[in-house]
Structure formats: C-alpha cells, structure tokens
Image: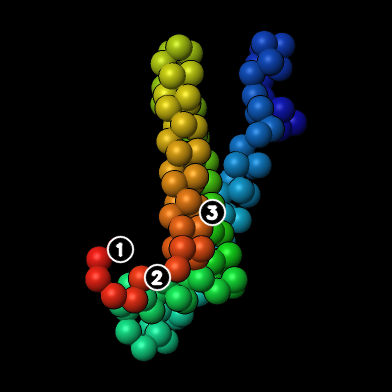
C-alpha cells in the first residue's frame, strides 16, 4: 500500500528519496538568508552615515564580516539548490542537463568566490583618508 503500481515497482519507478533533502536544504538556506539579511539591515540602519569609510570600517570588524560572508554563501547556495531542482525537472536531454548544471555550478562558485573576495578586500584593505584611492 502506498508503493505505487505493481508495474511501477518492477520498473523501479517511484520516489528517488532525494526530494526531501533538497527541500530541507532550501528551507535552511532561506532561514540563513533571512537572519543574515535582518542583521545587515539593522546594522546599516544603526550606522551614523553610509559613506564608504564608515561602511568599510564597519565591515572590517569580525562579526559583520562573518555575517556578510554567511549572507553571500547562503544566498548563492539557496539559488543553486533552487535552480538545480528546476533544471532537473524541466531539462530532459541528458547532454543539455549536464551543460546547464555545469554552467550553474560555475556561476555558483564564481559568484560566491567573488562575493567573499569583495568582503575580504573591504575588511582587510585600509581606507584611504583623502583623495582617490
């Protein structure tokens, strides 16, 4: 009962038992996005101004830098998981699916690394006090 039809069981058609994993990861990353985004908004609203020097000084502190890195990681991971499910459901040709998944993973890695690099650069490079940097 609940295992599908007899022919479906013979052919191996049925649940692949991986949908719950993606669903749960999608929810965890969504919560991570929400928590880090709320931290970002509240922190930026409490700054005296939003000048480059002020925001760079703020992100140079350990907690804001880590929270921003977590925001980048969870956002790109959340997007990747959602798009992977979309590709698996709607791209039928295995060659096309492989190509799209490869492009998706490269974009995910590239975007995450670029975001983390930008945060590290802001956190580690001292702000010039006068003139153009």
Q: Secondary structure at mark 1?
A: loop
Give the Cα distance between marks 1 and 2: 8 Å
Give residue 127's mark.
2
Residue 34 showing in the rendered view:
no
Secondary structure of the residue carrying tag 2 is loop
Q: Which residue is mark 3?
A: 74
Instruction: Give above or below for 66 relative to 111.
Output: below
Query: In the image, is residue 17 above or below residue 123?
Result: above
Q: State if disc 2 and disc 3 touch (CB < 8 Å).
A: no
User: Which of the two residues, 85 or 8, is positioned nearer the viewer here?
Assistant: 85
**Category of crowding for the residue at label 1, using alpha-carbon neighbours closer than 10 angstroms: few (below 14), some (14–19), many (at least 20):** few
**Of marks 3 and 2, which one's residue comes earlier in the chain?**
3
Q: Are marks 1 and 2 in contact (CB under 8 Å)?
A: yes
| Residue neighbourhood size for the residue with mark 3, other residues' Cα within 10 Å, grouped as few (<14), some (14–19), many (≥20) | many
Q: Residue furthest right?
A: 1
Percent position (x, y) of residue 22? Answer: 60, 42
Of circles 3 and 1, which is in front? 1
Judged from the image, the secondary structure of the residue bearing numbered disc 3 is: helix
Q: Quadrant of the C terminus?
A: bottom left
What is the residue that sits farthest to the front in this orientation? Answer: 130
**Residue at the spot of label 1:** 133
Q: Is tag 1's residue or tag 2's residue first in the polypeptide sequence?
A: 2
């Amino acid at each position: 009962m609940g295992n599908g039809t007899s022919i479906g069981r013979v052919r191996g058609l049925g649940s692949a038992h991986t949908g719950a994993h993606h669903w749960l990861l999608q929810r965890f990353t969504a919560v991570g996005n929400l928590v880090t985004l709320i931290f970002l908004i509240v922190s930026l609203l409490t700054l005296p101004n939003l000048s480059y020097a002020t925001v760079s000084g703020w992100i140079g502190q350990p907690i804001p830098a880590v929270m921003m890195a977590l925001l980048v990681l969870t956002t790109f991971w959340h997007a990747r998981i959602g798009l992977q499910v979309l590709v698996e459901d709607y791209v039928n040709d295995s060659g096309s699916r492989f190509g799209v998944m490869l492009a998706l993973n490269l974009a995910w890695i590239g975007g995450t690394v670029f975001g983390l690099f930008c945060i590290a650069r802001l956190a580690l490079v001292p702000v010039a006090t006068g003139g153009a940097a």
